[in-house]
Image (cartoon, grey):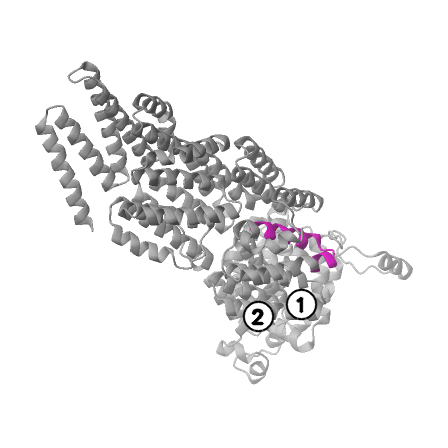
Amino acid sequence: MSRYLTPTKIGLLALISLYTESVVPSAATIPVLSFLISQVLPVNSVTSRNDDLLRSRDIALTLDDFQKATINHISGIPGRTVWDLLLNKLWKINSFDALHVFFDTLSLLLQKTPEQLQNEAEGGADTDSNPNRMLLSRTSPLGAFVRRARLEFTRLQFHYGLTLGKSFVPYRAPSLPQWKKRNQTAGNTSFDVNLQQDHLDLGDRLTEVAYGELETGALQVAGVSTEDVKKLLEYQVDQMQRMGSRLPQAMKMKLRDMIESGVTIPSLSHYVSFLDSWKAGDYPSSFDNLHRYFDYTMHNRDRTFYQYALLNLAILHQDFGCYSEAVVAIQETISTARENNDMVCLNYSLSWLYHFGKAHPEEIHEVRKKGVLGTDREALAFLKAKAKETSMWTLLSTSLLSEAKLSLSHGDGVAQAFESILKASHLNVTKNVVNAIGSQMSMQSSVFGRLGVNCQAWVYGELFLQCYASSSPVEDVVHCIGKSAFLLSQKGRYEDALARMEEIEEETLQILRYSQYWTSSLGLLKFQRHLHRDNLTAAEHVLSQLRAPLNPSQDLQFNVSMLEMDLLIRRGDYSKAMEMLEELATKFNEEEADTYQRVKLMTLKAQIYEKSGLPQKGFSVALRAASLAHRARLLPALWEAVGRVSAVLISLKEFSAAVKLLESIMPQVLECEDCNLSAQTFALLADAHVGMAGQAKAETLQRKEQLTKALERIERSFDEFSRIEDVRGQCEMMAKKATIMHLNGDPVLANDCAAKYLDIKRAAKDQL
């Protein structure tokens, strides 16, 4: 097939010719022009309507598409629609000679050049027989399309021109019944005027020589050209890079059919294969296709695109865990981009290196020593300045969000983080950076989660999934779903959380990185649920799977470590839990750890001291955790640290101080919507009231009042533990309640509590 021309383009040219003849009325001008422009403009410039067309019909229009676009519009000729006139123009191309005449007359659709006007003035000739014809500007989209089509037909070799004419015959054939209604002399051989004049039929010898394939049905419509395939591949690359998705299975089948039809496939197909193999986790194939594609570009474009090959190679190595190779590749990318003065590639490479350094700080010590990035703030300031200079708005928005994340990580304050987020939001709206809205709303959700306003964090996540998921990268959607599932699990809604994880499309899970994230998040939810149900054996099995090298994010790794230490605490192995905590804390001290993670480790350390019978030893640790959380406005972590401080006060018999402290934070604790945190706080408050009752005199009103308050707090704590299915917490509350009932002299209620305790234990064993 030809490099550019197809039967579809002949149809478009016929419609453009019809439009210039001034037979399209004013009411039909905008629909017809919209249809033409959506097919003529490049893929990255067309409207979303054309994107939908590319997804559903590929890029080869059928006559039905032309009919739907024109049949409802009355033409300037009475009794005829635009479709009738288009059909007449298409059936006038009834021979190979008519096809040549059709392309020769395309020059009449264009405005004449000054040289042509001068020649006509000197010769006194006017080749245009239609004075009412509307001429197209040679630089307009339609004019450029007509000029290129005419040029490509002129360049066609005879064989390819003949193939184009023959492929137009079956392309136009479905409209023969409609053409017969307007032209009574039309017949089965109307596609060639020579056959009609000589009264030849499809079975004649001459017809078989020229159109033998028509009778057997072997002649197929050559629907696409090399240019169309290139356009389709460019669209797929744009979608795969921007959205982070894989090549759809239907598109793979279409590309395979194109290859089998004999169309010359451009080298860009190797890059599409590289992206698809990379997303699928096929390292050898992706590496091979990457080298194939850039080997072709090196032959055609010298070293212009060499830095992009290195950049893709660095990203590929990083995704498959080859971090040292990734660092070497990105350093060479930066050097080559500077050498070629490619600021776009340079800025993107530096941004990638910054985020790589945050994810793997141990891998870029040598890079930091060379001063390539400087400090984190210096790197972000540089990226923001360069993004503004080169109008890279997506990079600028990402840098602002990274600045907000850095502020939260260092505990610099929420106001500074919100300022960066609002700047990014304003930029996304004013510059129409749609694909960055997901990251922005995810960051807003994280900030509200750290402030303890989980309802607001949930709203931002749902707003993103309902309104912006279709136009955002798949990675943002997957992470948002995982975060919302975690919020549901905090409320004890495990079934809803698992159902939310199942909302991720199966096509998305075909991408290795997202499948790993989904597997780790799902395992984390199940691990947490097994711990609460006191099914420690099942929890260990899930933990062994989570320890597999799935390459999860840092947050998931930290959550797995925290739950693993929780498992050790529930087993009573406090020394091993403390060793693991110290090892993790040492690692965080060597790196720039998140303030939230440091506070969580300090709080857990105080809890281990409490569980091991040495609560006072964790007093200073809990106080430092509370101070650090208060300074960074990490409110859920602050309330948890205050709870550890209250536990120390209870151990010191400072019950009234513990009650005042816990009651002051209880409203904010309930706002967090974290059932485990609420249950622990209510349990500590009950212990403090029991301690105050113990300090009061026996059989006094004050003692009864304190015990009554303790029972109320135990009931609330039991309800919170029940929501998250925490068996040990429920049993502990029932044991405390039975003890209080016994002290109150009510053995019947004490026995009921003991029986309920046994029922909970029995139900937990039945679930194993």
Circle 1: element type:
helix
Examine the structure image and report whether residue 350 is included in the region drawn in magenta: yes
* Residue nearest the viewer, comparing 43 with 172: 43
Q: Is residue 24 above or below residue 620?
A: below
Circle 2: element type:
helix
Q: Residue 304 appears at what percent x and percent y? A: 71, 63
Q: Is residue 594 visible?
A: yes
Q: CA distance from mark 1 to mark 2?
A: 37 Å
Q: Residue 177 appears at what percent x and percent y? A: 50, 64
Q: Residue 257 appears at what percent x and percent y? A: 51, 70
Q: Residue at coordinates 23% horizontally, 20% vertically from top-left?
A: 695
Q: Is residue 624 above or below residue 20?
A: above
Q: Which portion, as a residue range, is magenta? A: 336-355
Which amino acid is tagged 1? Thr
Q: Nearer the viewer, mark 1 or mark 2?
A: 1
As drawn, is 52 to the left or to the right of 694? Answer: right
Q: What secondary structure predominates along the stretch shown in magenta?
A: helix
Q: Residue 144 appears at what percent x and percent y? A: 72, 57
As drawn, is 248 to the left or to the right of 330? Answer: left
Q: Residue furthest bottom?
A: 205
Which amino acid is tagged 2? Val
Q: Badge 1 is on which residue?
A: 297
Q: How many marks?
A: 2
Q: Badge 2 is on which residue?
A: 169
Examine the structure image and report whether residue 369 is included in the region drawn in magenta: no
* Residue nearest the viewer, comparing 47 with 252: 252
As drawn, is 323 to the left or to the right of 509? Answer: right
- Which is nearer the N-term, disc 1 or disc 2? 2
